């Protein structure tokens, strides 16, 4: 992945962080995180939803290999694929909510449209 943010973590930690963020986003519909993490999670969430829209077995296996929860993947293919069938990308939005109290990191809400 060219141009990926490192987020101050080693590659395995960063990959797992993003997998967990995307899984939580799909489960809950919205998550609160830092701006940099949200921008990276948004990239992957859009790719996963696009795969879910395909709906074939290969796409399902690709999503299962990335996501950390099988029931979330089933929900993606059942509900989200139908919901976004007529939409060409832009499945998520980032809303800024201001700086975090402890370290003034820019916080955002990443949510499904």
Image: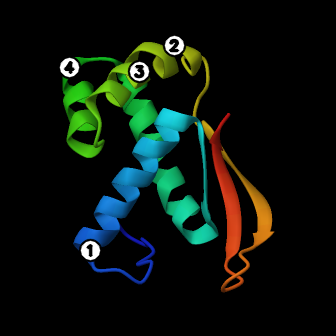
How far apart are the two marked residues, 1 and 2, measured between alpha carbons? 33 Å
How far across and down, in percent of the image, does residue 99 sit? 76, 75
Comparing labels 1 and 4, the label whose residue is closer to the camera: 1
Q: Residues within 10 Å of mark 2 (few under 14, many from 20)?
A: some
Q: Residues within 10 Å of mark 4 (few under 14, many from 20)?
A: few
Query: Regarding mark 3 in the picture, which secondary structure is present there?
Result: helix
How far across and down, in percent of the image, does residue 28 sit? 54, 36
Comparing labels 4 and 3, the label whose residue is closer to the camera: 3
- Quadrant of the rendering where the N terminus is positioned: bottom left
Comparing labels 3 and 1, the label whose residue is closer to the camera: 3
Comparing labels 2 and 3, the label whose residue is closer to the camera: 3
Up-down relation of residue 57 to residue 50 (above or below): above
Name the residue beneath numbered marker 3: 75
| Mark with earlier residue (2, 4) | 4
The answer to which quarter of the image holds residue 87 is top right
Residue 57 bears which disc, if any? 4
Name the residue beneath numbered marker 2: 82
Q: Is residue 58 left or right of residue 112?
A: left
Up-down relation of residue 103 to residue 98 (above or below): below
| Mark with earlier residue (1, 4) | 1
| Mark with earlier residue (1, 2) | 1
């Amino acid at each position: 992945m060219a141009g990926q943010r490192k987020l101050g973590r080693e590659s395995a930690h960063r990959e797992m962080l993003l997998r967990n963020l995307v899984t939580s986003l799909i489960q809950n519909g919205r998550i609160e995180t830092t701006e940099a993490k949200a921008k990276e999670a948004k990239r992957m969430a859009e790719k996963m939803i696009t795969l879910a829209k395909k709906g074939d077995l290969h796409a399902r296996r690709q999503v299962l290999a990335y996501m950390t929860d099988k029931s979330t993947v089933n929900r993606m293919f059942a509900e989200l694929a139908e919901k976004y069938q007529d939409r060409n990308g832009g499945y998520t939005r980032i809303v800024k909510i201001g700086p975090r109290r402890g370290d003034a990191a820019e916080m955002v809400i990443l949510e499904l449209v």
